[in-house]
Amino acid sequence: MSNDATDVTVYIEGNLMVFTCLTPAAKDWTRDNVSLEPWQWLGNGYAVDQHYANDLADGMREGGLTVVVTNDLSARELGISWP
């Protein structure tokens, strides 16, 4: 868990969201709570369909992680309920 630091960044790329864990807490949370297929990994991040992204981000926040969208696309414009 982190107070002010970002634990997870999310990059919106069309209907895919790429989640990248930046802290050990985020990596641990992902390992313990997310089932990922090998093809979902893109470098240090993993791709998630937009339909699952809200629940994933909400679970991360409930777990005490800080999640930040990093690109210029407006999540609200895409119909995604990011805070």
Image (spheres, helix red, strand yellow):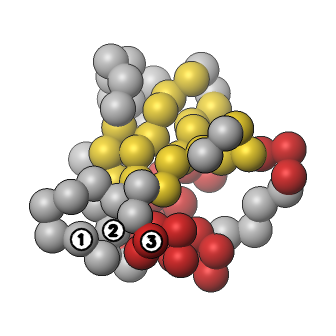
- Say which of 27 and 82 sits in front: 27
Whichever of labels 2 and 1 marks the residue nearer the N terminus, that label is 1
Residue 61 in the image: x percent, y percent?
34, 67
Residue 64 horizontal/vertical position (percent):
30, 76
Q: Which amino acid does label 2 sit on?
A: Leu
Q: Is mark 1 on a helix, strand or loop?
A: loop
Q: Mark 2 points at which residue?
A: 65
Q: Which of 57 and 65 is in front in this view?
A: 65
Instruction: Say whether disc 3 or disc 1 marks the residue closer to the N-terminus.
Output: 1
Q: Do the residues labelled 2 and 1 touch (CB within 8 Å)?
A: yes
Tag 3: residue type?
A: Pro
**Label 2 to label 3: alpha-carbon separation:** 11 Å
Image vertical order of residue 31 relative to residue 22, above or below: below
Report the residue marked by disc 3. 24
**Residue 41 vs residue 14, the one in the foreground:** 41
| Earlier-in-chain disc, 2 versus 3 | 3
Quick check: 50 left or right of 78? right
Name which quarter of the figure residue 70 lies in.
Answer: top left
